[in-house]
Amino acid sequence: MQEYSKNHSLREIRKLINILDTWGNVLVPTLPGDKETNALDRLTFFLNYLKTEFKIESLDDLQKEIDALNNKDKVICDALNTIYKQAKNGDINLVCYCKLPNKFVSCHGDFIKELIMDKLKNFIFFS
């Protein structure tokens, strides 16, 4: 089974709920390696995936996770996507004023670098 991030799964669930509310249980585009499926079957797949992989078992837990995803700061996500796109197209150099030279103390620039490097492995946009 293909692995998905928690945020990817939550975004898929959010989209599928909108599809079901708007058009009903229609056929939806397939995921790589999947057979043609309808929105309800796809929704069930991602709900089961979240339950198994991330222990999100109740509707309240699911709603909290979706609310957290919806409340992300768009400005920060846009900035991270800009860095991500530049890194995808070649090397970039992140410079941080708080990084101490020759010290092995992490700063927020190290966190951003780790986040971008992780996303480059999976080609996932921030949202």
Image: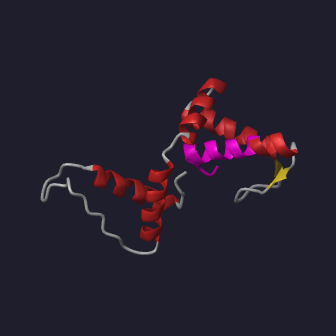
State the scheme by which the image is colored.
secondary structure
Percent of width and height locating residue 67: 58, 35
Say left or right for 99 vs 117: left
Percent of width and height locating residue 36: 83, 55
The residue most toward the bottom is 90
Q: Is residue 46 magenta?
A: no
Q: Residue at x 48, y 67 (%)?
A: 85
The residue most toward the left is 102
- The range drawn in magenta is 1-17
Percent of width and height locating residue 90: 41, 75
Q: Is residue 49 visible?
A: yes
Say left or right for 110 vs 59: left
Up the image or down, 65 lies above or below 95; here it is above
Q: Residue at x 52, y 59 (%)?
A: 122
Q: Main secondary structure of the magenta part?
A: helix
Say left or right for 77 vs 92: right
Q: Residue at x 81, y 40 (%)?
A: 21
Percent of width and height locating residue 102: 12, 58
Q: Nearer the viewer, residue 44 or 79?
A: 79
Q: Is residue 58 visible?
A: no
Image quadrant in which you'd find residue 44: top right
Up the image or down, 7 lies above or below 118; here it is above
Up the image or down, 101 lies above or below 14; here it is below
Q: Residue at x 56, y 45 (%)?
A: 7
What number of labels is visible? Answer: 0
